[in-house]
Amino acid sequence: MKKLEKTIGKLIDRQGVSFVASVDADGYPNMKAMLRPRKREGLKIFWFSTNTSSKRVAQYRGNPKACIYFFSKRLFLYRGVMLRGTIEILEDAAAKEMIWRCGDTMYYPGGVKDPDYCALKFTAHDGRYYSNFKSADFGV
């Protein structure tokens, strides 16, 4: 598992875009492209930033189940990893300050204390990795 974790970690760290899914009130998945995670703790914890007023935050408040996906394409080789888990919406100062980046005032004019800025903490439970025309499920 350590080798697979390292391989998947490298794939994730090289991507500039993440795909994050939520579940709406009717039980349908909703996928969204977001910037890469602000912070990653192995394959277990991923931190994102978003607007507190967003549709996704409302969906996570109703149902914390979530999925994140990363992929890489080189010539004819596709690799991808899907992680399933839950998302917590964190509005405390410590979480928000931990993932705050220079330039974020473009999205959150009130700075780190902007009430429309929050942290999303994704905790993975399991995943599926695809490479070389094969898929493998794994626990996290």
Image (cartoon, rainbow, N blue to C red):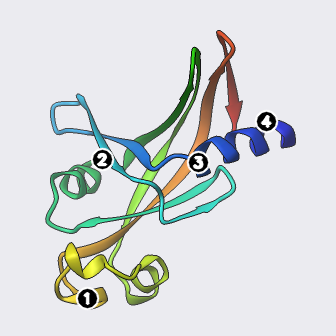
Name the amino acid type tagged 3: Arg
Mark 3 secondary-structure assignment: loop
Please state if 114 lies on the left or on the right of 94 as rendered.
left
Q: Tag 4 or tag 1, which sits nearer the N-term?
A: 4
Q: Tag 2 or tag 3, which sits nearer the N-term?
A: 3
Residue 74: x and y in percent read 58, 26
Q: Quadrant of the N terminus?
A: top right
Q: Nearer the viewer, mark 2 or mark 4?
A: 4
Q: Tag 1 or tag 2, which sits nearer the N-term?
A: 2
Task: Check disc 1 and report the residue beneath it.
Answer: 111
Please state if 110 lies on the left or on the right of 100 as rendered.
left
> Residue reaching furthest top?
133
Mark 2 secondary-structure assignment: loop
Q: Nearer the viewer, residue 14 or 70?
A: 14
Residue 86: x and y in percent read 45, 49
Task: Check disc 3 and report the residue beneath it.
Answer: 14
Q: Which class describes the residues within 10 Å of circle 4: few (<14), some (14-19), or many (20+)?
A: few
Name the amino acid type tagged 1: Gly
Q: Nearer the viewer, mark 3 or mark 2?
A: 3
Residue 66, quarter of the rendered image: top left
Residue 63: x and y in percent read 30, 47
Task: Check disc 2 and report the residue beneath it.
Answer: 63
Residue 4 tag number:
4
Separation (CA) of disc 2 from disc 1: 28 Å
Is residue 5 placed above or below 78 in the rendered structure?
below
Name the amino acid type tagged 4: Leu
